[in-house]
Image (cartoon, grey):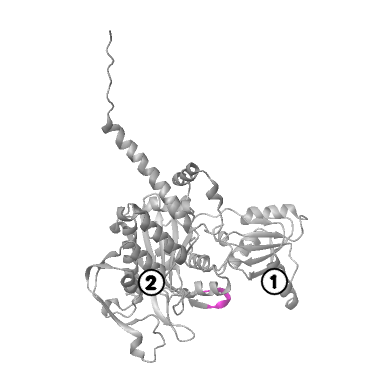
Amino acid sequence: MEENIDIPLKPRRLWPKIIGGLFVLFLLMYGFFYVRHLFVSTNTESWIDRIPLISQVKHLAESADRDLVGENRDRVNILLLGVGGKGHDGGQLSDTIMIASLKPSTKQVSLFSIPRDLAIPMGNRGWRKINSVNALAEAEDAGSGGIASSQAIGNLLEAPIDYYVRVDFDGFEKIIDEVGGVDVMVENTLDDYSYPIRGREDDPNYYARYEHLHVDAGQQHMNGELALKFARSRHGLGKEGSDFARARRQQKILEAVRQKVLSANTLLNPKKISSIISSLHENISTNLKVWEIVKIWSLVKNVQNDQIINKVLDNSPSGLLTDGKGDNGAYILSPRAGNFSEVIRAFADIFGTSSLSAPEDQPTTLNEPIKVSILNGTWINGLGTRSAQRLENSGVNVVEIANASRQNFEKSVLYDLGFGAKREALQFLKEKTGANIAPTLPDWLKEDLAASNATTKRVQPDFILILGTDADTN
């Protein structure tokens, strides 16, 4: 009679795999249910809410196989903007302007800070400080400041800015407080005797408007309020009394926040994550989708601070900028070279090799005569002229170059005023520009054209091309 022998399993080999699998599943579910609320309104049911749980988890898991915008050129650029927000003077002016660049092939990260006093050309607005782009766009079309800023800065650097994240001061403080504060290595003791006190901007007693901000050199633990003051201070004594020193402090704070958010104490605390997302929902604006956030997190989570490349545009002896005065006598910064060529090269080569140059396709020629009106639907200065030159080299008669009244287009749009009479030309323009073909003119464009015709005798075009951000890379 044979004896049944129970062969014991080897839990030491199986359990690590089981636990590891459950942990990954937990993180995916956890990330979805908390992060998605940043982008999904709580007042209406999203189509995402109707997908079975397993599909939601799968959607996030597959983000590793999807490409971020810019991944195909091995350079993902994210514009980071800090604004005052409600209750602050000049609340829509950009107090912080920084580009985080990711190089997926090497997992490298760079932070490139642009001073807010840098003067740039803004089309028919002339030369304006770069920090005004967000405010001007928001005044014309609420919610458009982020895309307008990314377009204008991308134009300046001759590089596409793929994403933007804009945070106001209140959100900045809340995030840091929610993660329990941040630890920052302060290089130089900071003494600022003119730090403005919020709410006392118009105090009759001039000296009551300011406080003495003091931060000792060395490792310091900062709550949200102190971290914001440390990042914003502009009038420190000695080395810390410039916008350039301020930009370096901002980079330090950002790196400290990244480390704290990615720490186990934060990632494994659902209540803390929920509070952070709640703060972000009220105080942040971004064009990042949920899966893109997950993908970016996978790229930067293991990067150490000493692996991050930091660059601040400044007016030092070896810097690329120089001091100057605008037409109204205000202080501005201008490129040392007289143009932005050095700045463009510094950004392009921040990882050591330029990844932005690419040969252009040889133009094909259109034999059928057509007339095209080009309207710049972006904040990219000179985009209309450059696009017109490319089309004219291909035999297109460009009869008008102007700015559209709406400048928040990400994708170029082509309107056929002949309603199919010149189909070959329409297809040619679509292939040449990459624009979407729209079936009818929108009401706002009809009104703009009617107003323009009432004051100016215009040549009737066959097509109207409204340029989006994508036109700068076509």
Residue that appears at 48% across and 86% down: 328
Residue to which mark 1 is pinned: 448
Q: Is residue 112 above or below residue 195?
A: above
Please name the residue that numbered disc 2 is placed on: 320
Kindly report which numbered mark, 2 or 1, lies closer to the viewer in this rendering: 1
- Residue 74 visible at all: no
* Disc 2 from disc 1: Cα separation: 41 Å
Circle 2: residue type:
Leu
Residue 87, image quadrant: bottom left
Query: Above or below — where is 302 with respect to 234?
Result: above
Q: Secondary structure at mark 2?
A: loop
Mark 1: which amino acid? Asp
**From the viewer's perspective, is residue 214 above or below residue 152?**
below
Of the pair 133 and 38, the residue shown nearer to us: 38
Could you tell me which residue is drawn at 47 percent across and 58 percent down? 38
Q: Residue furthest right?
A: 421
- Residue 226, position in %: x, y? 31, 72
Nearer to us in this view, 200 or 429: 200
Residue 455, percent from left and from top = 73, 78
Quarter of the image containing the N terminus? top left
Q: How many marks?
A: 2
